[in-house]
Amino acid sequence: MSGELDRALAAEHAAIFAYGPIGVRLTGAAAREARAAETAHRARRDALVVQLTAGGATAAPAAPSYTLPFPVTDAAAALRLAVEIEERTAAVWRAALAATSGAERTQVLAGLTDAAVRATRWRRLAQVTPATVAFPGRVV
């Protein structure tokens, strides 16, 4: 299971990085949402690091930098990136479901659910319709 959790940790590191450029382009409620999302990703990352190291694995550190899929030059691009980051993170958590059971499966499902809910919030803020998707984390 360590491989799936390693991928989840990498996704959380990338999400944390992305919220820097996202947050600086947003104001008001959207900026608060970005701070809350970054905090949630940091908490999930920290829990994964503890879990991996407690199991004897080495938790990979974050990369010094990540390549964003497109430039974040305004609020619209920031909202679009927030949706994409949460969808990507949900996909990694969803992929880990098949390899888990018990408490680990509960943890993985919580990661998927949290990312899916945040993606929905971002779609609503970006006025994207539909705001929800039938199978969160499903790669199409």
Image (tube, rainbow, N blue to C red):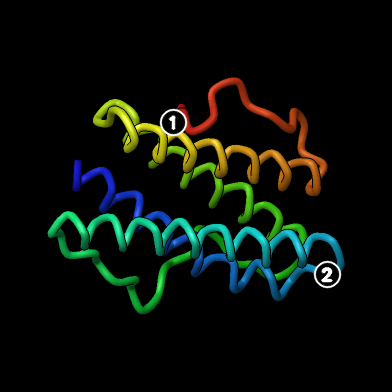
| Neighbourhood count class around disc 1 (C-alpha, 10 Å): few under 14, some 14–19, many 20 upward | few
Splitting the image into 4 quarters, where does residue 101 fall? top left
> Residue farthest to the bottom?
64
What amino acid does circle 1 point to? Val
Depth check: 16 or 58 in front?
58
Establish if 51 lies above or below 99. below
| Tag shown at residue 53 | none
Instruction: Please report whichever mark, 1 or 2, sits nearer to the chain's N-terminal start.
Output: 2
Task: Name the residue that disc number 2 marks.
Answer: 27
Name the residue: 56% across, 61% down: 70
Judge left or right: residue 26 versus residue 43: right
- Give residue 120's quadrant in the image: top right
- Is 57 on the left-hand or right-hand side of 91? left
Residue 78: percent from left, percent from top: 68, 61
Task: Kindly identify the amino acid type of the residue bearing the numbered disc 2.
Answer: Thr
The percent position of residue 88, horizontal first and vertical second, equals 47, 45
- Marking on residue 139: 1
Q: Quadrant of residue 133?
A: top right
Q: Secondary structure at mark 2?
A: loop
Q: Give the residue drawn at x 35%, y 49%.
A: 8
Q: Quadrant of the N terminus?
A: top left
Query: Residue furthest toward the left?
Result: 56
Q: Crowding near pointer 2: few (<14 within 10 Å), some, many (20+)?
A: few
* Residue drawn 78% across the image and 48% down it: 126
Pair 1/2: label in front: 2
Residue 44 position within the rendered picture, expressed as x and y whole percent measured from the top left: 46, 56
Q: CA distance from mark 1 to mark 2?
A: 31 Å
Rendered position, 6 above or below 50: above
Task: Give the residue at x 17% y 64%.
Answer: 58
